[in-house]
Amino acid sequence: MVNVDKLKEIARETISRDDVKYLIGWRQGTYGFRAAPYFMSTPEEAEELIFSPLCTNNLATYLTLAEKLPVPRGQEPDSRKVALLVKGCDSRAVVQQLVEQGISRERVLVIGCPCRGVIDQKKVEAKFPDVREAVSAVWDGDTVVFNLPGGSVAVPRQEVLAGKCLTCRYPNPVIADVTVWEEVAVWGSDDYVDVRELEAGSPQQRWGFWEEKFASCMRCYSCRNVCPMCYCEDCVLDRLNPQWIMRSVNTAENTAFHLARAFHLAGRCIECGECERVCPVDIPLMKLNRKLTKEVRDKYAYEPGVDPEAKPLQASYRPDDKEDFIL
Amino acid sequence: MNNKPKIGVYVCHCGVNIARTVDVEAVREFASRLPNVKVVRNYAYMCSDPGQLLIRDDVEKEGLNRIVVASCSPRMHENTFRKTLAAAGLNPYYLEMANIREQCSWVHEDREEATAKAKKLVYAAVAKARLLEPLYEKEVEVEPASLVIGGGIAGIQAALDIANAGFKVYLVEKTPSVGGRMSQLDKTFPTLDCSACILTPKMVDVANHPNIELLAYSQVEDISGYVGNFDVKVRKKARYVDVDKCTGCGICAEECRLKGRIPSEFDMGMGKRSAIYLPFPQAVPAKYTIDPERCLYLTRGKCGKSPKCADACTAGAINFEQQDEIVEFKVGTVIVATGFDTFDPTRKPEYGYADYDNVLTGLELERLVSASGPTGGNIVLGEGENAFVPKDIAFIKCVGSRDKSVGNEYCSRVCCMYTAKLAHLVEEKIPGANVRIYYMDVRAFGKGFEEFYDRVRREGIRYIRGNPSEIFKRGDKLVIKVEDTLAATPLEDEVDMVVLAVGLEPRKDAREIIDILRLSQSADRFYLEAHPKLAPVDTATDGVFLAGCAQGPKDIPDTVAQAKGAASSALVLLSSGKVKIQAQISFINENTCRGCGYCVEICPYGAIELVTISRMGNPVQVGRVNEALCKGCGACAAACFSGSAQQKSFMDRQILPQIAVLGVMR
């Protein structure tokens, strides 16, 4: 079972090590049902660590997002490890980053937190509107208990968990140097029902669906910035020469942006759902990502972010690879 | 130098090939209004001398610095016009071609629409031409040595030619002796000269040539590097016999406890050998080899009180402690002459090869008629008391060739003639033999073939057109069920012996070389040449050439011709000592590369590696292109997420404007 005291203890031990630079975890947010990413570098700071249904952020993003500051002449670059708390889904991002050599194994210390599913802010806020105070939450059997100002309320998990958690097949980290508590039983299975529903529509219906969604995009690039798999030094979509995508916000350019983003994630998306979570205009980006994930699974029997020894999909070739999609 | 683009556009009529479908004058007029275009001309044949002269004159008089030729595919004439530019004093890579033949006039009928498309293609080419950058070809030194893989007649011939030209040759043969398939043959068609008599002197030459290092019983483990500079690793398998001491006397084989108990590969399993053996009497090198899978001492650690071969060897050549040895060397060129396998007739179960002893393959009969074969050249079936000389003999052609049901659509090219040859030899050796040949077609296409086919028929050998459906046993006889399709008569033909004219197939271990050299296969699974007509001995990898049946079924004259071709292609590189490498290659922007290594995995030429560089003091991994290895295929550029890998002359910023003017963008 989740044991936050044990987590704190491990965090204190870890951060006391000479070869660890800092530890990335979660702490209670300042308002509502939120947890915030927490960067700690002293043992004392461990007191604030939490692990609860609020810990939605995929912290693996910060492994590649960390800025590499210029190293002054005569100094050695800091080669200490970064310690990282991961849920099952987050751990797949770490694996995929290893597969793509985005990070190196010896520079990261993975602390695995088997997880029972995190909340969907929107579902919870709909149930408990206008809560300004910081609210903590815990798992309790098949419920999530919210410690609201007026007293604790237990809500069935089914009603508040994020969509990705309801079908989760990887609640336990697939890679970890240490696992804080025992693994949990897998409850989910995934038949890509959401994708199948969309596929059932006519091309016109599907285009109509996406046209409406993409039209509302304001190109804040949050989806790209939060994605643990988007970490090029210099994104092609930002470039002016050549300019693949115009900066003007209109349906055509927005569509080009989203399609390019989705295709860059084909065979790489580990379905943490962060892009969809942070979208301010509720574009169902996971439907798009999962469509490609399903294609990749069906055509190449490939699942990203599971095996650190695997080759990246786009960089592997078998003579019997399907090519029936080539016109 | 003022490098403001001044573009000349040249629209080719290609006789009527283009002009019939495309209004070349309208294209010329259209192009004259495009930005930066100074000169536009159309001409009947741009590739002709006067056509090229137009370009040279205009460069001189009008100061053109970019040239667009609207004509055929760049595969056809890009090189021609690059030379024109060079002769005019321009960098040859200031050329852009618009393909208005293969991609326009040849595939369209409507003149108006074809003209409109030609205009667009020219517009796109002009848009890109403005952004072209000069490129420079580099030269690398060529290591004056060659590797020949395979010691059959193809490899032997290629090795001898290169060695005779004065260059070092490493000839690697997998089995203990050179000679290959040809050494197993008795006579060769259509002249009926003795195979061994013409081959053996060449085998001896190979062994004695001062420029040839023969690595028999060896296998190529790894080849890295690029044209002119291949690093080769060869595994010399342990023979357990010290070749410097072995005199080839053969006493060891006489003494071996397993003498006469192991099927001889050379005799297609019909003869028997010892565990220590010489594959055949004329083997080169004439050194004995211990079969590590059969030898009692090597498999069980014990051979009586002591190994009899070691006791018998007066030279003390037996050495059970011998280990495989890795030999490394550098070569400039590689010739792949790995040969073929014969079709396994058990894949055609209706012919009963697995069931009946009297159903043979052509190569097995070849060993039977050979004087050096297991029966001393007598065609005798069965053993001991049951031995008999077959009288009624049938050949079945196209077994495993021209047969989609076994996945071989191709003709094996030698079976028609070797069948005729074997039929002739059978007639000669068995007086009064009754020989018939069941065939689909007779393909007697080579020099002297048709004459030989005529001769064989005159000798009384019957050709019956029909593809047998089944072979079964009735009493002592084999019955062939077949329809004579010329007479439209179903037959049941009772015979003593059936010979299956099995076809040629790619070697079962063909993949090993593919993995080592990154070769391609054609649809028939043989190694793919660079161009079926104009580069039949080249491969997609520079400096690697093909010879013999590794590339496709061939008879001996064709094999020797191709081997000589491969040798001379290799010699072009070796004797010039330098080789120009591609200019339109890829490069990686190390400032934006994120080091994911997708390009490394995807590169078919192994031209990219990850290196660690310092980015503001931080070590980061980035991809780096080996310019000598890169062939400019652009796969890395397509795979790169960040657009850091780019191909010169096909950079994103050169291609996007080209697409843009086609109306797709903006």
Image (tube, coloured by chain):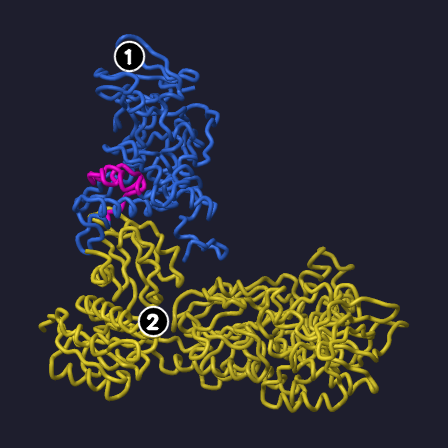
- In-image side of A100 versus B458 (left or right): left
Disc 2: which residue: B108
Q: Is residue A79 above or below residue B305?
A: above
Chain letter, colour blue: A
The residue type indicated by label 1 comes to Leu
As rendered, which of B145 and B243 lies closer to the eye?
Answer: B145
| Marking on residue B77 | none
* Disc 2 packing (10 Å; few <14; some 14–19; many ≥20): some
- Chain assignment, label 1: A
Asked whether residue A40 is drawn in magenta, I would say no
State the hue of chain B.
yellow
| Marking on residue A148 | 1
- Chain assignment, label 2: B
> Residue at position x 13%, y 74% from top?
B6
Specify whether residue B190 is in view.
yes
Q: Is residue A312 above or below residue B362?
A: above
The residue type indicated by label 2 comes to His
